[in-house]
C-alpha cells in the first residue's frame, strides 16, 4: 500500500502544478476541455521524469485560470531543463516572452500562411523592424487588443439556473441576461 501512495502523491502534486487541483476522481475524462486533457497528459509525463522527449503542446493554457499560468510555464521550463525539447503553439504573451526561441509563421492563416516571418529570441522580436510580423507589435506592447463594439444593454429577460451540479459545480445558482452573448468563465 505504501508503494501505491508513494506513486500517487507526485502525480497529484503535478496535477496541482498544472492548475488541475480541482479535478475529482469521479470526473469523466470526456468532460475535460482540450486544455485540461492536455495538462493531464503533461502532468503524467512530468511524473515519469522522462528525458530526451519532444513535447508538442497546442495552446496548453486554454481554459487555465491566469493565476495558474506561471505554474504551467515553470513546468514547461522544467521539462526543457530535463533535456527535453518543448515546442509550443501559442499566442499567449507570457508564454512567448519566456520562450528560448520564437518562430512566427504567416502572414495569414491557411493558404495565406506558411512562411517564416521571424525566428529568434523574444527580445530580438520586439526590436525587429519586419513589417510582416503580426505578433511583434503586441509583444513589444505597441499595439493592444481593444474592445471595438458597443455593449448591448439587457432587455429585462433572464435565464435562471438553480442548484447546478455537474463536473465542478456544486449547487451553483446563476442568473444570465437574455438576448445577450454571455460568457461564464473562471475556476
Image (cartoon, helix red, strand yellow):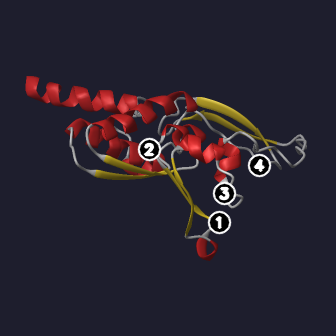
Who is closer to the viewer here, 134 or 125? 125
The CA span between labels 3 and 1 is 7 Å
* Tag 1 residue: 107
Which numbered circle lies on residue 181? Answer: 4
The mark closer to the camera, 3 or 2, is 3
* Tag 3 residue: 133
Look at the image and tell me in which quarter the C terminus lies.
Answer: top right
Q: Residue at x 65, y 44 (%)?
A: 127
Q: Residue at x 32, y 39 (%)?
A: 79
Label whose residue precedes the other's in the sequence (3 or 2): 2
Lateral position of residue 131 relative to residue 117, left or right: right
The CA span between labels 2 and 1 is 30 Å
Label whose residue precedes the other's in the sequence (2 or 4): 2
The CA span between labels 1 and 4 is 31 Å
The mark closer to the camera, 1 or 4, is 1
Label whose residue precedes the other's in the sequence (1 or 4): 1
* Tag 2 residue: 36
Q: Element type at marker 2?
A: helix
Which numbered circle lies on residue 12? Answer: none
Amino acid at each position: 500500500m505504501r508503494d501505491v501512495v508513494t506513486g500517487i502523491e507526485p502525480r497529484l502534486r503535478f496535477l496541482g502544478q498544472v492548475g488541475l487541483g480541482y479535478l475529482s476522481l469521479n470526473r469523466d475524462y470526456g468532460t475535460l476541455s482540450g486544455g485540461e486533457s492536455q495538462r493531464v497528459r503533461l502532468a503524467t509525463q512530468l511524473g515519469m521524469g522522462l528525458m530526451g522527449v519532444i513535447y508538442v503542446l497546442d495552446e496548453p493554457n486554454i481554459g487555465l485560470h491566469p493565476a495558474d499560468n506561471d505554474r504551467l510555464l515553470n513546468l514547461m521550463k522544467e521539462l526543457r531543463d530535463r533535456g527535453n525539447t518543448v515546442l509550443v503553439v501559442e499566442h499567449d504573451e507570457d508564454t512567448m516572452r519566456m520562450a528560448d526561441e520564437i518562430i512566427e509563421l504567416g502572414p495569414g492563416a491557411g493558404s495565406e500562411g506558411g512562411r517564416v516571418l521571424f525566428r529568434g529570441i523574444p527580445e530580438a522580436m520586439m526590436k525587429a523592424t519586419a513589417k510582416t510580423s503580426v505578433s511583434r507589435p503586441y509583444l513589444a506592447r505597441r499595439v493592444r487588443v481593444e474592445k471595438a463594439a458597443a455593449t448591448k444593454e439587457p432587455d429585462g429577460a433572464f435565464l435562471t439556473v438553480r442548484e447546478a451540479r455537474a463536473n465542478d459545480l456544486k449547487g451553483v445558482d446563476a442568473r444570465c441576461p437574455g438576448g445577450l452573448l454571455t460568457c461564464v468563465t473562471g475556476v
